[in-house]
Amino acid sequence: MASNPFDSDEDQSAASGEILEGFLCPICRADLKSIDVLTDHFARQHAEEEDTLKSVFNIFVKAKKKILNNFEDERGAAGSSYSTAGGPSANSNGNGADQRVLSNARSRFNVFNYMSKQQVGAECSHFEYFQSVRNPRLERYASETNKLIIRLHRLLKDLPSDSVQRKQHEQQTVAWLDGTSVKLCPSCAKSFHIARRQHHCRLCGGIMCNDCSKFLALENALQLASLSTSRSEPLQQMHQGDRAIRLCEHCLWLLDTRQDMHESRTCRPLLVQVYEQIRQLQKDVTPDLDMYLKIINSLHEGETIFTITDASALRGKIGQVAETMDMRSKRILAIYCEPGSREESLKKAIRLSCIQAIKERMLSLPPLPDEALIQQIQERKRMETEQRILTEQRMAMEAYERYGLGATIIQSGGGLESGSFAQGSDLQSINNWSAPQASTSKSGLDDPLIEQINIIKGYIKQARQDMNFEVVETLELNLRELQREVYERQRKSQNSAASPEVEQQQQNQS
């Protein structure tokens, strides 16, 4: 028997000029499509030809040894061609084998010298090539998915509940492939017979077996097709076993990809939702922190725009926000994730940032001042203000006395000693936003300034209840302006009433 089992076949192939490719059997030259099928075929069909099998095995063993020996010879030649000092080896005996090894190493070294070397830091961008491959593929997937969704909408729009009518409706909506010439399942390559029947994809019409079929739930199909439940009431009456649509693997993958993309854009993870709540709490509490510091500074300066009650209420609100933030951060830690993952590190970082924000911004606020101390500061400032007013009055009286008007000033001094604000029942406060006038006097009802003062006082009371202290500050300043205006009008009216008496006294003196 010939040592080479391929002599006759090689002669035939050389004569015919044909080149065979694939997973070919070395005996019968049959193309068996895969290595597993080739192995099974050779074991079953050619098990008796042991000599041929041994010869094929010997060929591979010899080729393997030849490759390994060549690799070891080249590696040994590269190590023995130079001495430890960097020069040629002193043990070279000058025979033909050593010269051949040296020539091979030298030629290989020269080839490396003539090769172009890449510079350090050189970069090559493949982004354009990536886009050229990716964009057409995405466009194709998007186009196929849109077609499937249109077909799914048409399929579910008037889908009957009866099984026979439903099959006819599916065949009319999407054309099914003819299965007379299809003998194998395209997915698993198993043959069809009585026990393994042919099935069709309801969206592309492709053929597959029952094991390779995929099913899309009717509820998910209605969601993908953008059909409301009111229009699909007949579908709700279908049998539980029929509440799914048979699809192939490719069509189901396209629809699942579209649904995952939609959920990723609309649905957010619980971690993201809780973190956004924490960020919103931090954003909302920032103006309250600034306002609390402003109220404390205002109280220490002796101003009367804000009170200690306002500061206490605002501090309680800030404490509630800090407690809520702490609870939210603990909830983030309770969300399950893989131990040692980046998500776990992210949760710990969020928790630490919340603790730091609570300690540095909320718990480090200055405490509420003592009420007695604040009253002393306000009383001292009031006395300083009165002293300043008295000094101004004395200077004004001295100036008037130079012109002989001292009596007039004495008579009209009651108006100057009344202070910087209007007094009396016209400035009483109210209890609601509508701000009805508190005074029943005719002069108060006829005066629009008094009515406006009462309205502003009602607004201030409501703003304090809502803890909107920025509005309180603005309204308090407006109220003081109106009170000054009322005071100026009262003083002018008193001066105008006293002017005839001053003229009579001047005539008597003259």
Image: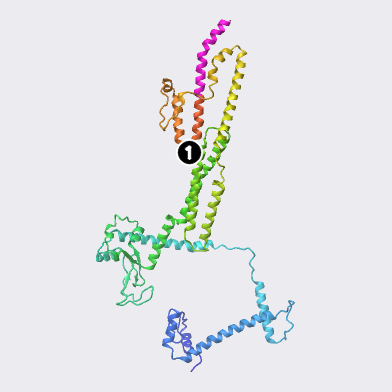
Q: Is residue 442 above or below residue 101?
A: above
> At 42% across and 81% down in the image, what residue appears?
37
Q: Is residue 56 above or below residue 192?
A: below
Q: Badge 1, how many Cα within 10 Å: few under 14, some, many 20+?
A: some
382 is within the stretch colored magenta = no
> At 49% across and 57% down in the image, what residue appears?
333
Classify residue 75 by image quadrant. bottom right
Q: Measured from the top left, where is residue 366 in percent x and y?
A: 57, 42
Left or right of 312 in this view: 196: left
Classify residue 420 by image quadrant. top right
Question: Of 4 and 227, which appears nearest the observer?
Answer: 227
Question: Of 357 and 197, which appears nearest the observer?
Answer: 357
Q: Tell me where the magenta segment starts and ends, as one range.
A: 485-510
Q: Measured from the top left, where is residue 390 in percent x and y?
A: 59, 22
Question: Of 167 and 461, which appears nearest the observer?
Answer: 461
> At 50% across and 30% down in the image, what residue appears?
478
508 is within the stretch colored magenta = yes
Q: Residue furthest bottom?
A: 1
* Main secondary structure of the magenta stretch: helix
> At 51% across and 16% down in the image, what residue appears?
494
Res 31 visible: no
Which amino acid, by three-letter code, is at mark 1?
Asn
Q: Is residue 118 above or below residue 478?
A: below
Determine whether the residue tagged by mark 1 lies in a helix, strand or loop: loop
Q: How is the image coloured?
A: rainbow
Q: Measured from the top left, where is residue 49 in percent x and y?
A: 45, 91
